[in-house]
Image: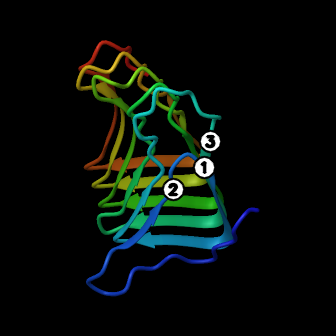
Amino acid sequence: IKPVLRTLLAKEDEKSEIYVRQNSIFIRGERFVADNAEILADIPFSVETRPESVFDIEAGTVELKNDTHFSTDTFGSTDGPSLNIRASESVAISESEIRIGSVGSTASGDAGRLSIEARDVPLSNTKIRSESKKGSTGKAGDVRVAASESVTLSDSAIETYTTGMGRAG
């Protein structure tokens, strides 16, 4: 089942949250807005390896703003979910964070991949991080940002790094 979500908007002074563990998220619609929202598709510690999962958004326009946080970290032996954001028009991200990582001394799984594709990708006051940290032996994920017209960064950073034993993406 692929749930269809046209718009995700937080109520004023409230944070919308979606938590998914070890399953895939598919969001489809003409317009997707995450305003002061949190979507965590993290993989908790487990000694067993689980099937691959994905966090996938596809829309005409995608907007992440006002302290929105997306995460697909892994804390165990299972690889983290890939995060794909595609829009026919724009993926606009402002004052928000996207993180894919392999985190902690129990993490041996690799971080997922991050892919952002649109005609235009403006990033403003935003952090996009791929990391292997806190003793992880897993690899940080690869990051791909592609636009047919323009990618614009304003007070933003795209980082891939390791402070653990794994490799950077």
Nearer-the-camera pick, 163 or 43: 43
Real-space Cα separation, disc 2 to disc 3, in angstroms = 10 Å
Instruction: Say which residue appears at 62% left-offset and 41% top-offset.
Output: 53
Nearer-the-camera pick, 55 or 59: 55
Do the residues under discs 2 and 1 have CB atoms within 8 angstroms? yes
Instruction: Say which residue appears at 68% left-offset and 71% top-offset.
Output: 29
The location of residue 101, given as percent across then percent down, is: 39, 34
Report which residue position mark 2 lands on: 20
Real-space Cα separation, disc 1 to disc 3, in angstroms = 6 Å
The location of residue 95, given as percent across then percent down, is: 29, 61
Q: Which mark is residue 53?
A: 3
Instruction: Say which residue appears at 23% left-offset and 20% top-offset.
Output: 163
Crowding around mark 3 (Cα neighbors within 10 Å: few <14, some 14 to 19, many 20+) is many
Give the amino acid type for the residue marked by disc 2 in the picture: Val
Looking at the rendered structure, the secondary structure element under dot 2 is loop
Do the residues under discs 1 and 3 have CB atoms within 8 angstroms? yes
Task: Give the residue at the far front of this rendering.
Answer: 47
Left or right placement of residue 19 versus residue 168 in this view: right
- Residue 36's quadrant in the figure? bottom left
Q: Which mark is residue 23?
A: 1
Q: Is residue 51 above or below residue 108?
A: below
Q: Which mark is residue 98?
A: none
